[in-house]
Amino acid sequence: MTCAIRAEELRKTFRVRETASGLGGTLRSLLRPRYREVHALAGVSFALEPGEMVGFIGPNGAGKSTTIKILSGILVPDGGTCTVGGLVPWERRVEHVARLGVVFGQRTQLWWDLPVTESFDLLADIYRLDRARAARRRQELVGRLDLGPLLDVPVRQLSLGQRMRCELAAALLHEPGLLFLDEPTIGLDAPAKLAIREFLRSLNREQGVTVILTTHDLDDVEALCRRLVVIHHGRLLFDGDLDGLRARVTSERRLTVDLDGDLDPARLPGVTVVAREGRRLVLAFDPATVSAPELIARLAALAPVRDLTVEAPPIEEIVAGFYRGLDP
Amino acid sequence: MIPRQPATIGRPELALFLARFRTLVQYRAAAAAGFVTQLFWGVIRLAILAAFIDGAPAASPMTPSAIIAYVWLSQACFAMLPWNLDPEILALVRSGNVAGELVRPLGLYRQWFCRCLAARTAPPLLRGIPLLAIAWTAGDLPLPAGVATAAAWLAALAGAALLCATFATLMNVCLLFTLSGDGINGLMAAVVTLGSGLILPLPFLPDGWQRVLEILPFRGMVDAPFRLYGGDLPLTALGSILAHQAAWILILGAAGWWLCRAAERRMTVQGG
Ligand SMILES: Nc1ncnc2c1ncn2[C@@H]1O[C@H](COP(=O)(O)OP(=O)(O)O)[C@@H](O)[C@H]1O
Ligand SMILES: [Mg+2]
């Protein structure tokens, strides 16, 4: 089944009640409430092909969760259109969510008081799954996400990382072709993040599940998504791959060298020092002015080099640079 | 996608109800506290009613044994009355965790009805059975006059449980429009306890009130089933009691379902 997504000019405005401070302010806002409009989405358009895995990034309040809620059918936009696999999510919600997996990283969709295994049984009943097939699928997910030891634990007793693995399994029991993840790695430690990334990668590659994930952790995007969408103030500002975003911000490269002697960087034209730590030097250069081989040759002529690497600046800096360029 | 299993009408609803029921049955401490409170209030209510009729026994609208039955049965079933919002639904709506229910392929009304039915049956069973056992043995609560009376009582009780759950679901749906449950909670507590006969058995109320309460749904929650038990209402009244309950279940259910659909369309799920 194709589950391509098409969103056009999605808009959502929230009216937030303003409460003035002080007793007088409280009374005034009781008598004549004042509202402030928050444009959570101010016209967002994008399209996804089946099998894509796309990362939505953007600062807090950018509109990422609002987008996911609309795509999931649990929030009705004020304007614009959207179809997911041919259905308008909020018009046919029950039908729509039956073929969809959703995980909201900041909330649980499991039953707090029930052991994990009972939550899974309950989901199989709610989705009216064929029992034999659901049991096979469940076994597969338990194996891949290493949930065996957690099955009899009540959800309330799980650590965040354990719970998130269970949430993923719960969202996938009914074999949806589409998975929406709102901050799935928020608050997790490094091993838990790696486990979840590994799982999502294989889910997308091997089973062709279409994935949209929102995140703050740009490593998620770098590790998982060929395509990246940047949302800011409810607008879509970039849609493309990481190299494209990099090119928009800077062409800068970084050269890290470990030296066996001393070096005066002033003798290397076209280079700025980013960091210096003992005999390790991090230099920034623009490949358009001086190419990497050229720079390395000059460097080697000046001082004995023990080790060196050339990299693009880390993704955090790229994205920070991108945001800086937006709010002058 | 996994193919759906055919011919399993009610499978999701039954599973949700049972899961919630089992969870509620585990709340033993709440049950013990509720049991003690209900026992205490039962004794107080009986003392007040006794003082009330002692003045003029002939004028009492109910016989002493019917009063005793009414009081103990309504204390035992207190937790069945929809006098408050479901605290968990309140938390779900306030925190936005209701998103978790909205992404399941089942209408919100059905999910909440299952929750409410469990909430209106598990706690009263847990507290009510020991309370009845005590009232039967130590509190001179008479047993039903015969098998037919017992069966009629149980039938009306089942209708009452459904009616209570339907009313509770409607109240919880109203929450979607306000977010703050305080107003709804206060109103529910007042109307339900008075209208159902929990504060004062309905036959003690003035005639004008009784004529109104006769029509309103609350009579079907406490008053009617328990007057059947105590013989204050004849067995032949069972048909009209069940019809009254069924009519209100349909009306309140339709209203709740319709409001819920309207709310789902304009609802903003809280939080990111
Ligand atoms: N239920 C709501 N009521 C009022 N304002 C909201 C609500 N949900 C989101 N917002 C506002 O909409 C904007 C976008 O929010 P959101 O989509 O959650 O951002 P993100 O997930 O990118 O951090 C924010 O300014 C937020 O305050
Ligand atoms: Mg968010």
Image: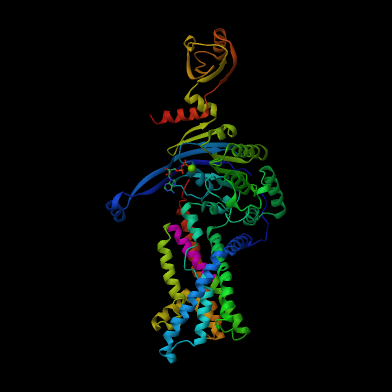
Q: Position of residue B143 (x, y in %)?
A: 59, 83
Q: Is residue A270 magenta?
A: no
Q: Nearer the viewer, residue A105 or A14?
A: A105
* Residue B249 seen in the figure: no
- Determine the image quadrant of residue B117: bottom right
Q: Position of residue A59 (x, y in %)?
A: 46, 37
Q: Is residue A294 left or right of residue A34?
A: right
Q: Residue at x 56, y 9 (%)?
A: A303
Q: Residue at x 48, y 56 (%)?
A: B91
Q: Position of residue A105 (x, y in %)?
A: 54, 45
Q: Is residue B30 above or below residue A67?
A: below
Over which residues does the magenta segment extend? B162-177
Q: How many marks?
A: 0
Q: Is residue A69 above or below residue B182?
A: above
Q: Residue at x 57, y 78 (%)?
A: B134
Q: Nearer the viewer, residue B100 or A107?
A: A107
Q: Position of residue A45 (x, y in %)?
A: 49, 38
